[in-house]
Image: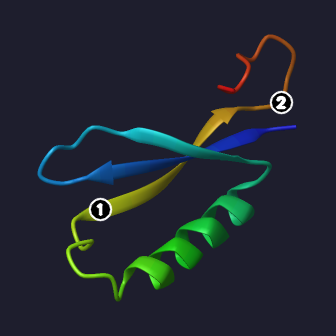
Amino acid sequence: MPVFWLILVTAPVATPLHVGNFPSLETCQQAVYSSQQTLRGAPGNTNFQLVCVQASTGKAGDPDPPD
């Protein structure tokens, strides 16, 4: 099964942070949408970006996701 990581990038310091694992791109994108709706009204939280990245293909030899 493939694994998609949800990555949070904040500004002005663009240090990426792994914040979640998802079984499909669609579920990862749903988490992005949900998070953006939640954080949209919060003061001072406008300088962030959430990105979905495929971390593995689900095939033998792929690295394990982080704990």
Please tell me how crowded label 1 is: few (under 14), some (14-19), or many (20+) other residues with Cα within 10 Å: some
Q: Which residue is mark 1?
A: 48
Tag count in the figure?
2
In the picture, measured across the screen, residue 20 lies left or right of residue 11, that is right
Amino acid type, mark 2: Gly
Q: Residue furthest front?
A: 43
42 w.r.t. 7: above or below:
below
**Residue 14 falls in which quadrant of the image?**
top left
Which amino acid is tagged 1? Phe
Q: Residue furthest bottom?
A: 41
Residue at 65%, 72% in the rendered image: 30
Instruction: Give the SS element for disc 1.
Output: strand
Above or below residue 64? Residue 22 is below
Residue at x 79% of width, y 10% of height: 61
Q: Going 48% across and 81% down the picture, which residue do you hit? A: 38
Q: Position of residue 51 (x, y in %)?
A: 46, 54
Give the position of the N terminus as an image quadrant: top right
Query: Position of 43 compared to 55: left or right?
Result: left
Discs 1, 2 touching: Cβ within 8 Å: no
Name, please, the residue furthest toward the left.
12
Q: For the C terminus, which image quadrant? A: top right
Q: Which residue is mark 2?
A: 58
Alpha-carbon span between mark 1 and mark 2: 29 Å
- Residue 40 at what x, y percent from top left? 36, 84
Left or right of 55: which side holds 19?
A: left
Q: Judge depth for marks 1 and 2 and give the one in front.
A: 1
* Percent position of residue 26, x then y: 71, 65
- Residue drawn at x 55%, y 76% as measured from the top left: 33
Q: Earlier in the sequence, mark 1 or mark 2?
A: 1
| Residue 34 placement: quadrant | bottom right
Secondary structure beneath dot 2 equals loop
Vertical arrangement, residue 28 with respect to residue 13, above or below: below
